[in-house]
Image: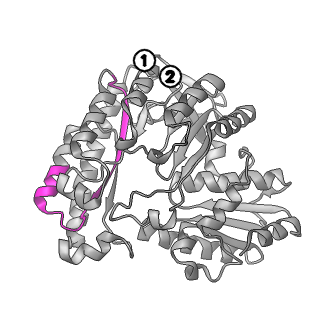
Amino acid sequence: MSISKFKEIIDHAPRKTFLVKSLGCRTNQAEVLAIAGWLEKQGWKSDSVSPYLIIINTCAVTQKGFAESKRTAKLLKKRYPQAKIIPIGCGVSFSPQAFSFASFTFDNPEKEKILQKINCPFSFQINHPFPRSHRFLLRIQSGCRQFCTYCIVPFLRSSLISLPPAKAIYLIKQAEKKGFQEVVLTGTNLSFYRGKSFSLLTLLRKIEKETSLPRISFGSLNPEGISPSLINFLKKRWQTNSPRFSRYLHLPLQSGSEKILKKMNRPYHLSQYLKVVDKLTQDNPFLGLGTDIIVGFPGETEKEFKETVKIIQQLPFSRLHVFRYNPRPGTAAAKMEKEWGRVSKEEKIRRAALIRKIGKEKEKAFKEKLIGKTFPVLFLEQVAPQKWYGLTDNYIGITYPSSQNLQGKIVSVKITSRLLNL
């Protein structure tokens, strides 16, 4: 489907109502919300009752994400038979025939053509959790050329795109005017955020100087993209009681085995990862640290799995995302799985369960460290009468009693075990 045809449908729609859905990563969410903001600017309204257009940003990173993308698109077609169903993104690029039932589709290159024309933030009127939480998702980067052996993303998003700082500042200022309290800087791989005259650190300095939005946080940051100067910049800002830069970083590890990291083609050595974590956490006991772990990668023996367990126990993680390896067609690991050695499904389940158990223990220990201390909390939603759910700046959720409307407000809160539901 050509971009001109999409514009024709937009211009001649019998009713200007839309619904957006997103599967997978935050970059997908940021993209679909940007499109929603553009539609709103054209006079369209977000409507979950009678939408004319339904745009679904699909995922193909995992088998589960791809299956959920197809299922969601089919369910929405059944629920809204009169609507134009428009799957876009990675799932379409991966397998366009899987969405043959749709009104039309956009793969990633076509989606990028639309996104390059968009310069407006989304608003609270869009039917999506992020706007209601007063968190503004800003995609500053897209594309990856790392080609980790398990990952399909570089085949689907090969074009490297970085949002110039001036444009990012413009959008953040627009979000400020609308009342957003937090900007989440996201991208396919933020390590690739750069231009001839700018880097991630350049952008952060400009955001600090030229905007006043109270909380700035990040999507995943790979360790090879975290320079000593970036570490020093963040650590200086974290020394205040209410820092603008979130005291939470998500640093994907994937494996604690040097041998498996090499097979994965990860762009760092284990020693490099440990050095970055050590520098970040020195004199920062309340820094929240998240990571991703893949278990059952081809050739992962019990010895190498135990190396991962040891590293996880050693490091001060507050949040773990654990994935069982599933081959993605076309990737190097899928081609080499037989030669390297398959790990059984039962063994993957066992390993994932063990690491998730350790993750829960580490999360509980981190939460207990917060008790008695005061942290700024952004309240996202009301979860019960006079009860509000919010996030500390180190990404810990609390439930807080109040008769006041705290939606979208940042409040300093003294943490108790009751607030943490411990």
The tally of labels here is 2
Identify residue type, mark 1.
Gln
Report crowding for label 1: few under 14, some 14 to 19, many 20 or more residues within 10 A (C-alpha).
few
Label 1 sits on residue:
239
Place of residue 360 in the rendered image (x, y in percent of width and height, measured from the top left): 30, 45
Residue farthest to the left?
Answer: 303
Q: Is residue 297 left or right of residue 422?
A: left
Tell me the distance, in whole angstroms, between the alpha carbons under discs 2 and 1: 7 Å
Query: Where is residue 195, by image quadrant?
Result: top right
Q: Is residue 29 left or right of residue 4?
A: left
Q: Position of residue 402 (x, y in %)?
A: 59, 28
Q: Contact (CB < 8 A) between labels 2 and 1?
A: yes
| 112, 30: nearer the viewer | 112
Q: Position of residue 60 (x, y in %)?
A: 48, 68
Residues in magenta, as a range: 284-308
* In this rendering, position of residue 96 left or right of residue 192: right
Secondary structure beneath disc 2?
loop
Q: Could you tell whether 390 is left or right of 415 in the image?
A: right
Residue 184 in picture, x, y percent from top left: 56, 40
Q: Amino acid at mark 2?
A: Pro
Residue 292 is a magenta residue: yes
Instruction: Give the residue at mark 2.
Output: 243
What residue sits 47% from the left and 21% below the top?
A: 237
Residue 415 visible in the snapshot:
no
Instruction: Please indicate, yes or no, whether residue 9 appears anywhere in the rendered image.
Output: yes
Q: Residue at x 30, y 28 (%)?
A: 279
Residue beneath the point at 45% across and 63% down: 154
